[in-house]
Image (cartoon, coloured by chain):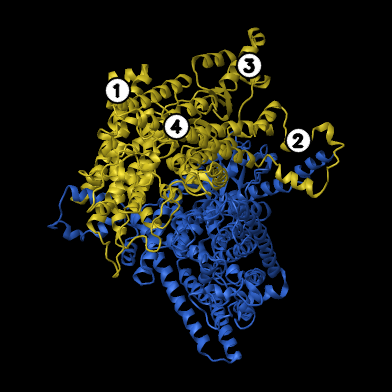
Chain colours: A yellow, B blue
Amino acid sequence: MEELVGLCEGSVGKPVTLPELWGPCPHVRGCDPLSCPGGLEWLKQRLFRVGEDWYFLAALGVLMALISYAMNFATGCVVQVHNWLYREIGDSHLLRYLSWTVYPVALLSFSSGFSQSITASSGGSGIPEVKTMLSGVILEDYLDIKNFGAKVVGLCCTLATGSTIFLGKVGPFTHMSVMMAAYLGRVRTKTIGESENKTKEMEMLVAGAAVGVATVFAAPFSGVLFSIEVMSSHFSVWNYWRGFFAATCGAFTFRLLAVFNSEQETITSIYKTSFRVDVPFDLPEIFFFVVLGAVCGILSSAYNFCQRTFLGFLKTNRFTSQLLATSKPLYAALAALILASITYPPGVGRFMASRLSMGEHLESLFDNNSWALMTWNSSPPWPAELDPQNLWLEWYHPQFTVFGTLTFFLVMKFWMLILATTIPIPAGYFMPLLVYGAAIGRLMGEVLSAAFPEGIMSGGVANPIMPGAYALAGAAAFSGAVTHSISTALLAFEITGQIVHALPVLMAVLVANAISQSCQPSFYDGTIIVKKLPYLPWIRGRNIGSYPVTVGHFMNTSITTLAKDMPLEEVLKVVTSTDVTRYVLVESAESQILVGTVERTQLMQTLQAEPASWALGQQCCLQDLLAGGCATQPVTLQLSPETSLHQTHNLFELLNLQWLLVTSRGRAVGSVSWVELKKAISTLTNPPATKEASLGLQNKV
Amino acid sequence: MEELVGLCEGSVGKPVTLPELWGPCPHVRGCDPLSCPGGLEWLKQRLFRVGEDWYFLAALGVLMALISYAMNFATGCVVQVHNWLYREIGDSHLLRYLSWTVYPVALLSFSSGFSQSITASSGGSGIPEVKTMLSGVILEDYLDIKNFGAKVVGLCCTLATGSTIFLGKVGPFTHMSVMMAAYLGRVRTKTIGESENKTKEMEMLVAGAAVGVATVFAAPFSGVLFSIEVMSSHFSVWNYWRGFFAATCGAFTFRLLAVFNSEQETITSIYKTSFRVDVPFDLPEIFFFVVLGAVCGILSSAYNFCQRTFLGFLKTNRFTSQLLATSKPLYAALAALILASITYPPGVGRFMASRLSMGEHLESLFDNNSWALMTWNSSPPWPAELDPQNLWLEWYHPQFTVFGTLTFFLVMKFWMLILATTIPIPAGYFMPLLVYGAAIGRLMGEVLSAAFPEGIMSGGVANPIMPGAYALAGAAAFSGAVTHSISTALLAFEITGQIVHALPVLMAVLVANAISQSCQPSFYDGTIIVKKLPYLPWIRGRNIGSYPVTVGHFMNTSITTLAKDMPLEEVLKVVTSTDVTRYVLVESAESQILVGTVERTQLMQTLQAEPASWALGQQCCLQDLLAGGCATQPVTLQLSPETSLHQTHNLFELLNLQWLLVTSRGRAVGSVSWVELKKAISTLTNPPATKEASLGLQNKV
């Protein structure tokens, strides 16, 4: 693929088709003995039609899978070395403590410093920015392939800290995947040599987002759905198919590499579980699954609220804002030191299973035995070394029991995770949510299994409760509630390879989402709000008062128009006194009939190029300039002042628009951009006297 | 719910909110001792906010699940009675033959006659019509709740014929669900008392489509996704969440009823499998899964082609078209007689497992043992009675072996299924596709398992091949290829409760789709084409020549405009000589500046109401009439002749538009509807001299 890319780039101007590239050289073609017309030619044409950009989608999937696997492999090695060092360094507590803490501190400050030095905006998960881009706003800097390296190195360092810092991979990897998609999209456009407008490029980006999630978890279904839910508000089935194709290529390659590397015997899911299949749960347990969903929903709202508040606090507090502005690596080092000190295993860390990696956390929490019942009578000691066969022993402490450690884990990780998300490094925040949710579910499952050691009676037969199933539901519900998505349920099935709990998990996720969506904006939306990215809010279904609002109420009426019969001096005056990107061109100053738009840069160029003629003092007007070479863009879509807010909102969302002109009887009367729309929606949501309040009063009277 | 519906309908004009309905009567409210302000009031308001129409969605899911279960129960009883009759009638071949054939013949002719007598358009699956409706074209007749009964009765009769006729339930049930959604949507609008425009109603319909699929297979995920893939081209995440909620309610209720009826111990999937989990397949088998996908893709193209051709033949052939036009029950009876005679078990039917119901077909085909290996040395006799423990024995014949019966099944069912789809009864065509695909996969699996009895060696360890897994992949791939959807892969996992073959099945489905989508329109699109329903084709990615095409090239320039200064006589002349639904209103005959549109009916009414004044011979013009009370609608969205075909296509698809006006410098110059768009796209696809042909020539030179 790499050679192909090189080849294609060489011939920028001229349209080159892949058959030309892959076929024999042009001068040889005439005497090619193998050129067999008919069927072969037909097949060749069908397969090598570049217009159908399946090749690029497949390449995207395979490339990202290779990178994902390589990153996992590299970070795995670093983690192993760290573990070996920690084991072999001797029994001195100081040395052990230092070996435990220095490592993440060094890695994180390097990660922060390195990635910040290359690009200022590489911190965080990247999903909020991707979401903004997919809504049509181009943040050029975020898609530059140059940042790719910074992200890779930074993310590898973050991941190499293991579960000490407790951060994941999904967000930045999705961002990287979108970068790569944008790059391949540009290569594709060059190869075809067509200017295919923005739609095609956007299609690649959407596929890129799906590939990102799919290659991290080897989960094509939920990759596609999660990317849609989190990153778009509308999507076409056409994009969905392309996303599936790319995601499947990625997930397949990713798991194939594991087989080739002898980690796996065949292609399977990454956190395989072995839940009981015949009667996975008794009917009354559905109730507890729903309760679990509600608990996850409430906790996720609390989490989102605290996270946003803390992020706001860091920005407003004088000391921290200065620290974050001037010396990010120092902040990263300080935060890493705190987090690493707490997780030091011989210290507090032993109560929160800190010797496990994040993958092992998930694996152990999904265990289908009940720890509470297993430790009912016997109390195994805390193992001095990690026992790979009995990972769950890490969660047990003779005095605290499993309930104590799980509760302690939940309490501590709540603020530790919030602290970790504020470190300016490329890091994903989804995997920690999965683990946290799994711990919530596990705690509930263990409590239930202790309360009903025989299982819950229904229809004469009782089956013991599997706390692992609750962990699965908790993981899906909590991560779904924080990110406001339902496909995490599907993700839970895809990563465990079992779908026997389909309905209870889905119900838990729905309940959790219902609660969190009605209380708080999602984690990613929260970041968008805090970072002040361009963002078009939803019109909530409840605002029934929103239906009569029309464009006339909120459009921007102060548009700068240039009339065709305007003298050039006046044009120059307007151009120099304003700095909009384009001007609205109208027929004449009186009629104001819309003709089209002129870009400012082009107008400036033409004005500068023609000083000779208009310096002569001739009464030139804009019309002559336009006839002379300054191109006008036609306005392809016009609103009218009577268009409703809902219709406009739909248009902007569906077509990823930035700006539309409003005409009335042909006259340009205003314009609407997402700024006006946002303002209109926010006045709806917070009106002077809310409709609900008045309704409440009516009810009381 | 039913009472609620009645209650709401009573107060059509006045806005009624649910709290008013459910709360105590107004005159009692004042002295209600339980009215506790504060928290309770707040909770009540939050829960009973009708604007958030979750109640209606839940009601939709629960209602459809109840109906689905009741239908299954009823048809199950009828099938049991038939089986009992067939068993007990004695050994006389004539009697047995009669009991086998008369039953389906009677049921089908009744089904056809009854449903046709109530509504002429109740035949077929209904999905093509639902698809048309979801694209914005209102086919009023199809959503009338009156047809609901006809559909229920007709579908029950169809299903009661069992596997003799070999038809399913999904299509009509989806249609019924959409009808119910439309009805509940109307109730909702009345309850709120708001005219909330078409968007809200459409949202209910989309959810209805999801519920339909979900309550048949108890599969919420694939229900939502299948409905999206098959029935829409774009959708919003907002609709997707609502669909999930309704589908989960439906699927849960549907399975809960099975538990309550003691069919199941707990909530599980409907066709549970027990595939090996640890190493479900060896890596080299991936190749065979892909080959299976290709085979399914080719067969599905052949199936779609034959089905469409045969449907066309029936319409053009003089004899059959007359038969279908005048006596549909007779045609149904004839077809049923042919199909039942062939499936008569002591006759040819024994070679195609015709004693199994369709569910048992699927269950037996998903069996995880290899029949070829089991019958390698021993040859069990053909059982005289159906053995519920060893359903697979039905697929085995001592002389033919399993290969023979499976091949015979595939050959015969191919044309039998096509014949069955032409019978004018309410029937689903999806379930037969699943069974047919499973048989394709099973055949391939059995061949492989006979070819590699030890399994395929990879990495030293060999695991025996499970033909059931191929059956699963085949079912997903074939049904996916025929309907052009990918979510059938997910459906396969949801109905079997196992997801261990996630990647191979997905790859098979993708390959099958790639082949079938490049060869033939989907089954449903084919029906839309044959039935000549309004239908907006896709612009294929390959038509690079489509980008420069603009609205100016294909718009309809002959629009009927009415100028404001037109004398009334002239207006009357125009109105009587044309029969468009609305007229374009322009400022004056010379300027042609667009003002708005006037509906024909309204114009007629006003014209008829004001004959007095204009009979007086006064020189009235249209302006006076408009001032007098004839309302004009504003044009909320305008195209320009420079808008590209792609942009227009997107607009029409995304916003479900039917008609847009084109203006240039304020003047109304033309209009675009889906008819013009369709024509423009079809000239692109079949240009006088295709671009591809010329490319091919270039290559050869």
**In 3D space, how far apart are the residues under numbered discs 2 and 3 (Cα atoms)?**
40 Å
Q: Nearer the viewer, mark 4 or mark 3?
A: 4
User: Residue beneath label 4, please?
Assistant: A126
N-terminal-most mark, 3 or 1: 1
Q: Are marks 2 and 3 on the same chain?
A: yes
Is residue A69 visible from the viewing direction of this image?
yes
Return the mark for residue A606.
3
The amino acid beneath tag 1 is: Thr
Disc 2 secondary structure class = helix
**In 3D space, how far apart are the residues under numbered discs 1 and 2 (Cα atoms)?**
59 Å
N-terminal-most mark, 2 or 4: 2
Q: Looking at this view, is A117 or A313 the one in front?
A: A117
User: Residue beneath label 2, please?
Assistant: A20
N-terminal-most mark, 4 or 3: 4
User: Residue beneath label 1, please?
Assistant: A316
Q: Looking at this view, is A68 or A399 the one in front?
A: A399
- Residue A86 at what x, y percent from top left? 36, 30
- Can you say whether B186 is above or below A652 in the image? below
**In 3D space, how far apart are the residues under numbered discs 2 and 4 (Cα atoms)?**
38 Å
Q: Nearer the viewer, mark 1 or mark 2?
A: 2
- Residue A483 at what x, y percent from top left? 38, 41
**In 3D space, how far apart are the residues under numbered discs 3 and 1 (Cα atoms)?**
47 Å
Dot 1 crowding, Cα within 10 Å, few <14, some 14–19, many 20+: few
N-terminal-most mark, 1 or 2: 2
N-terminal-most mark, 2 or 3: 2
Disc 1 secondary structure class = helix
- Pointers 1 and 4 in contact (C-beta within 8 Å): no
- Residue B226 at what x, y percent from top left? 51, 55
Is residue A195 visible from the viewing direction of this image?
no
